[in-house]
Image (cartoon, rainbow, N blue to C red):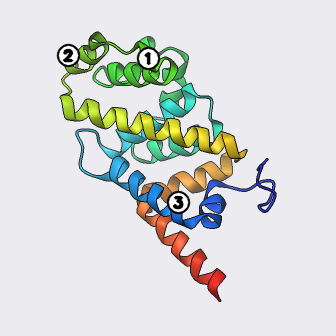
Amino acid sequence: MSYLGSLPTDATLLQVFQKFPAPAAKLLDLHELIMRAPSAFGAGERELIAAYVSGVNDCRYCHGVHTVTAEAFGVPEGLLAAALADLGSSPVDDRMKPVLAYVGKLTRTPSRMTQADAEAVFAAGWDEAALHDAVLVCALFNFMNRMVEGLGIRADSAYAKTSGERLKEGGYAGLATLLGEASVERAH
């Protein structure tokens, strides 16, 4: 239930973005950069990180949307649920397990991060740029989870599917074009 009285009680994040297009446009630019620019992690792996962080935070909206998006990029169905239940025994690729462990710890207890946590990521074959990218995805989705929860944004699985598929096809830049269309409609 949206806490913004000027929006419907079942408002989506897209509706919040359309109501507040200036910060939304900057946020979507940042999403496009972090989630789709060249990286050691493919788009599906970054969506996996986003969905995992959102699951750790119990942000059902972001977890649902980004699970669908990760699966659209080829992450096997059920992988995220297994990773959240028990990362160690989950079928997550061995190279990604330390990355997810890192962002999980960073989400739960950020002040307790250590060099050993980073070394586990490096030992799995990732470099400093990859660690940096993982931290940015983690930070972005901790921010977004708090934004969504703070505004009371909820969505059902049908909306998560629609939104996840839209993100797979158009990326975050595609959402930015929807903001432009909404601004033009309001102007007329």
Element class at badge 2: helix
Taking 15 as reference, is 129 left or right? Answer: left
x%, y% of residue 125? Answer: 18, 23
* Residue drawn 48% across the image and 47% down it: 69
The residue at which mark 3 appears reads as 24
Q: Which residue is mark 1?
A: 111
Neighbor class of circle 2 (other Cα within 10 Å; few <14, some 14-19, many 20+) is few
Say which quadrant the C terminus sits in.
bottom right
Alpha carbon distance from label 3 to label 2:
37 Å
The answer to whether any part of residue 154 appears in the image is: no
Amino acid type indicated by mark 3: Ala
Q: Nearer the viewer, residue 71 or 184?
A: 184
Residue drawn at x 55%, y 77% as measured from the top left: 181
Q: Nearer the viewer, residue 27 or 99?
A: 27
Could you tell which of marks 3 and 2 lies nearer the N-terminus? 3
Viewer-side residue, 187 vs 55: 187
Q: Residues within 10 Å of mark 1 (few under 14, many from 20)?
A: few
Marks 3 and 1, Cα distance to the nearest angstrom?
A: 29 Å
Circle 3 or circle 1, nearest the eye: 1
Which residue type carries mark 2? Ala
Instruction: Work out whether mark 3 precedes mark 1 in sequence or the reverse, and give the earlier one.
Output: 3
Q: Locate residue 126 relative to residue 176 in the image: left or right.
A: left
Which amino acid type is marked by label 1? Answer: Ser
User: In the picture shown, does residue 66 fall above or below 37?
Assistant: above
Lateral position of residue 89 relative to residue 81, left or right: left
Q: CA distance from mark 1 to mark 2?
A: 22 Å
Residue at left offset 58%, top offset 39%: 145
Residue that carries the numbered disc 2 in the rendered image: 123
